[in-house]
Image: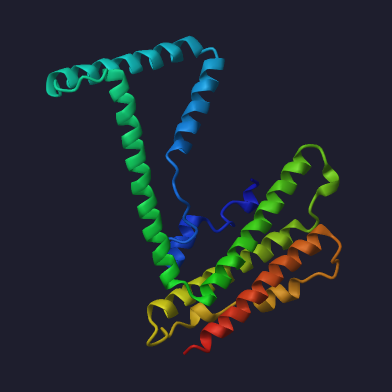
Amino acid sequence: MRDDLQGLEISQDELQKLTNLPVNEKLVIITNPLKILAKIYIQKLKSSEGATVVFIGFSTFVFVYILFDIIIKIFVTWITIPSWILLMILGLWVGGLTQTFLYLIWKTRNKIVNINMTKSLQVLLNEVNRYNTVIRVIDINDQIEEAGNPEVIIKEREDVIEALKLTKTDLVRALKTEKVLRENKSFILSNTELFVNNLATLTAMQVTEQATEHGRLLNEALQIALDVQHEMKKLQTQR
């Protein structure tokens, strides 16, 4: 990602801080980290470090197995099942228990989001997704350009980036406002800074070249800003 795009995307952590809710949280599947470790292990095997990786991996497995076998024979003498089968059963049991625990945590946090979800917040979250999508589109376009396709270059790039910066500012302010309203339903905090927006500036930057990539991206940013402005007006009428 180019330097001018760095920091523009609204990350999940930033979004959760702005809303004070665990929004867009995904269920953690314990097999996913294992798959990543397996890929890393396979890549190491194919490299010049392959023999060392095999030795370390095999040694670690043998050490764990021997240690487990000793513990079983000393403290659980009444179990007649072979230790290697018991180790597999224990691994599956621990894995299942961990996944259940992770699911319950995700379910609880998801329930918190559903309870506190408002129509305005849902609209703003959709706008954040649209905004982040524009960032990703530009990033992919940059990669295509760097691959040897100069014809896809985004003209007037500075205008597009400036429009995105202004849009992000409005999105952040709208999310802050929604949070204040949601958490303080009996009154609205008097903070004019939250209600200032950059819509006029964005409108002035709107281009007429609808068919160009530059014009399309600017107009997309403007449309997001318009939607945010509309939602801000709805929020202010709740006073």
Question: Residue, x 52% and y 83% (percent of image)?
Answer: 235
Q: Position of residue 166 (x, y in %)?
A: 63, 68
The answer to whether 156 appears left or right of 22 in the picture is right
Question: Residue, x 66% and y 52% (percent of image)?
Answer: 136
123 vs 215: above or below: below
How many numbered marks appear? 0
Among the 4 quarters of the image, the one containing residue 162: bottom right
Among the 4 quarters of the image, the one containing residue 88: top left
> From where the camera sits, is residue 64 visible?
no
Q: Position of residue 216 (x, y in %)?
A: 78, 63
Along the line of sight, which residue is nearer the eye, 94 or 187? 94
Along the line of sight, which residue is nearer the eye, 102 or 200? 102
Q: Quadrant of the N terminus?
A: top right
The answer to whether 88 appears left or right of 129 in the picture is left
Q: Position of residue 19 (x, y in %)?
A: 45, 67
Along the line of sight, which residue is nearer the eye, 135 or 117? 117
151 vs 215: above or below: above
> From where the camera sits, is residue 80 visible?
yes
161 vs 120: above or below: above
Question: Residue, x 31% and y 19% (percent of image)?
Answer: 84
The answer to whether 216 appears left or right of 121 in the picture is right
Question: Residue, x 37% and y 87% (percent of image)?
Answer: 186
Q: Colour scheme of this structure image?
A: rainbow
Q: Position of residue 18 (x, y in %)?
A: 46, 66
